Every structure is written in C-alpha cells, then in structure tokens.
Amino acid sequence: MKVKLKLDETDHQILNMLIDNTRTPFTDIAKKLDISAGTVHVRVKKMEESGIIIGSSLTLNYKKLGYTFIAYVGIFLEKTSQTQFVLNRIEEIPNITVAHVTTGKFNLFCKIRARNTEHAKNIIFLIDDIDGVSRTETMISMEESLNDKTRLMKSIFENM
C-alpha cells in the first residue's frame, strides 16, 4: 500500500536536483541544502515508498548511437478486442520505444527509432505483419524539437 506523503520545500528542492541529474550524490544535495546526507536519504526513501519516485532513469543520446531516424506510427486494428494482443507483439520489437492506446483516428500510436529509412521500413513491416493490425500510417519526424520531461516535473513541484 502506497503511503500518502505531503511534500515540503526541502522535498521539492531534493526532487529538483534529482530531476536535473538522478545520479547526484546525496552528500552533494545535503551540502547545497545545508542538511545531512541521512536526511536526504530518509526523504528520498519516503518518496519512493509513497510512489512519488519510481526508480531512476538513464537518458541515452540515440543519435550518437547511430539511431537518427524517428517516426511515429499510427496503428489501425481490425477489432479493438485485439488491443492487448497487438501491444504484447509490439513489446517484442525493441525499436518501438513508446506505445499508446489512443482514441480518435488510430487505435495505437507508437514512436520508433531506427538507424535510417531502410531500417525504419523493416520495423514498420514487422508492425504490419502482426495479426490484428489492419494497416498503419507513418509520420516521419524531421526534428525532435522538444523532449524535456523535467519541465513538467519542475512545474508540478513549483505549484504544490
């Protein structure tokens, strides 16, 4: 059972520093906030236990790894009852980095990362071959102009 936790200004400051860099040592946070490293540890642990903090993440520079092609694929299903089956198959394709069940035009909407157009084509063909997929519609990303999860998190904590 998750514990309901009321965050104070110190918690907000700790979270802001961890949002900027999840690898920031607790001793560095403690020095900046003029509190003990033990206090930082206890507060982070409470935020983890309450479900506010869920693990920590690593951000990769896909371009430096050779994955410069981004596309979004809207997926039309034959029947909405096939959604979970198709999602399970999508999970087997590692180049699909995000998948959403959506309303509107598409049943599912995915983000793919590939090395180039040929590689992307092969990934899209894998999606098309999943039982239950009637067709797909692809939009190529010309440039990823904004991808900043920290902006929303900081805004949430500033308004608490």
Image (cartoon, helix red, strand yellow):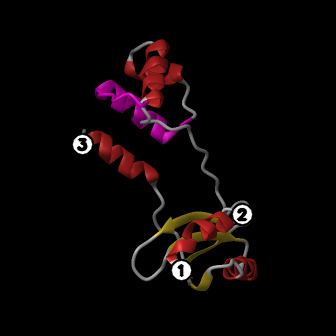
Image side of residue 31 versus residue 76, left or right? left
**Given this view, does label 2 or label 1 mark the residue nearer the observer?**
1
Q: Is residue 67 above or below residue 1?
A: below
Question: Regarding mark 3 in the picture, which secondary structure is present there?
Answer: loop
Report the magenta residues as a range: 1-22
Image side of residue 59 versus residue 50, left or right? right
Q: Position of residue 138 (x, y in %)?
A: 57, 83
Marks 2 and 3, how far apart at CA: 39 Å
> Please, which residue is most extreme toward the front here?
81
Give amino acid for label 3: Asn
The residue shown at (52%, 22%) is 26
| Crowding at mark 1 (Cα within 10 Å: few <14, some 14-19, many 20+) | few
- Residue at label 1? 79
Give amino acid for label 2: Glu
Magenta span has 8? yes
Q: Is residue 27 above or below residue 20?
A: above
| Crowding at mark 2 (Cα within 10 Å: few <14, some 14-19, many 20+) | few
The residue shown at (47%, 80%) is 106
> Which of the numbered marks, if any, corresponds to residue 144?
none
Question: Regarding mark 1 in the picture, which secondary structure is present there?
Answer: loop
- Residue at label 3? 159
The residue shown at (55%, 65%) is 99
